[in-house]
Image: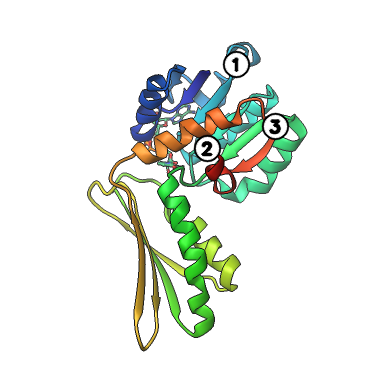
Amino acid sequence: MRMLLLGRGKTGAMVAELARHRGHEVEVLGAAENPHGKALTGERLASVDVVIDFTISHAVLENIQACLRCKKNMVVGTTGWYQHLEQVRRMVEDSGAGFLYASNFSVGVNLFFDVARTAAAAIQHHYSGQIFERHHAQKKDAPSGTAMTLQRVVREASRTELEITSFREGDVVGMHELVLDSPADTIYICHDAKSRRGFAEGAVRAAEWLANKRGFFDFKEVWREL
Ligand SMILES: NC(=O)c1ccc[n+]([C@@H]2O[C@H](COP(=O)([O-])OP(=O)(O)OC[C@H]3O[C@@H](n4cnc5c(N)ncnc54)[C@H](OP(=O)(O)O)[C@@H]3O)[C@@H](O)[C@H]2O)c1
């Protein structure tokens, strides 16, 4: 496939490497080459099969709008924009393009969400719950998109909104923990990413999956099909 990758940061660089390794043609644009999504014109996108975004929360919405205007399929890994989720869903439906997003493209994290959904039953048995997330000091948004997804997963399973505590330190790739506590015992469920490879591989495989599809997709619902 011909992929246009937005963002050549820590995750974008790994996505580009893995996509090329899987035989795709990859072009990359950084912030200076794409201010306010201006590089994403019909002409520029005509020869592209899919756009993959790993940029920053304040840039991603303009990138999404530009791609959808050109009916271009898009995979979005950037976090920090979910307050616009419903608006984007409508834009995708109106455009007829294919759109897939995830706060976390790692298959391991998506399994972790399933485990958390099951464990949330503890809350009905009078356990209290807390979410902790730890990331490298340069991470711009807090809480992490993954922590917010974990919070939503538990809320949907237990009708309880858990508090999220965020830590920013060192070069931690991404650690998420659900702790369920009762007077009798404590349950710890933890996912600890060793590198960005899991995110990058999931994003590239998601882009392959999205080929020739239309509609709005959450990776959480499709990762088993990859
Ligand atoms: N969904 C997942 O699985 C997953 C996994 C990891 C990270 N993320 C998310 O992905 C995003 C990127 O993370 P990261 O750690 O790679 O950050 P990063 O290292 O800071 O990289 C961000 C990159 O975006 C570029 N950029 C900013 N505006 C742009 C624009 N308009 N067009 C093109 N490029 C633009 C920046 O370019 P300059 O360097 O030129 O400023 C930078 O290279 C964050 O939102 C993070 O939370 C998601």
Q: Specify which label sits upstream in the sequence, 1 or 3.
A: 1
Where disc 1 sits, the SS reads helix
* C-alpha separation, residue under disc 2 versus residue under disc 3: 17 Å
Which residue is nearer to you in this view: 225 or 195? 225
Q: Are marks 2 and 3 in contact (CB under 8 Å)?
A: no
Determine which residue is flagged by label 1: 45
Disc 2 residue: CB within 8 Å of ligand 1:
no
Across and down, in percent, residue 73 comes to 62, 27
Is residue 66 shown above or below 93? Answer: above
Determine which residue is flagged by label 3: 214
Which residue is nearer to you in this view: 82 or 38? 82
Report the colour scheme.
Answer: rainbow
Looking at numbered disc 3 in the image, what kind of residue is underneath it? Arg
Q: Specify which label sits upstream in the sequence, 2 or 1.
A: 1
- On screen, residue 65 versus residue 80, left or right, reads right
Looking at numbered disc 2 in the image, what kind of residue is underneath it? Leu
Where disc 2 sits, the SS reads loop
* C-alpha separation, residue under disc 1 versus residue under disc 3: 17 Å
Determine which residue is flagged by label 2: 226
- The residue under the point 67% across, 30% down is 213
Q: Residues within 10 Å of mark 3 (few under 14, many from 20)?
A: some
Q: Residues within 10 Å of mark 2 (few under 14, many from 20)?
A: few
Across and down, in percent, residue 142 comes to 42, 54
Labels 1, 3: front one: 3
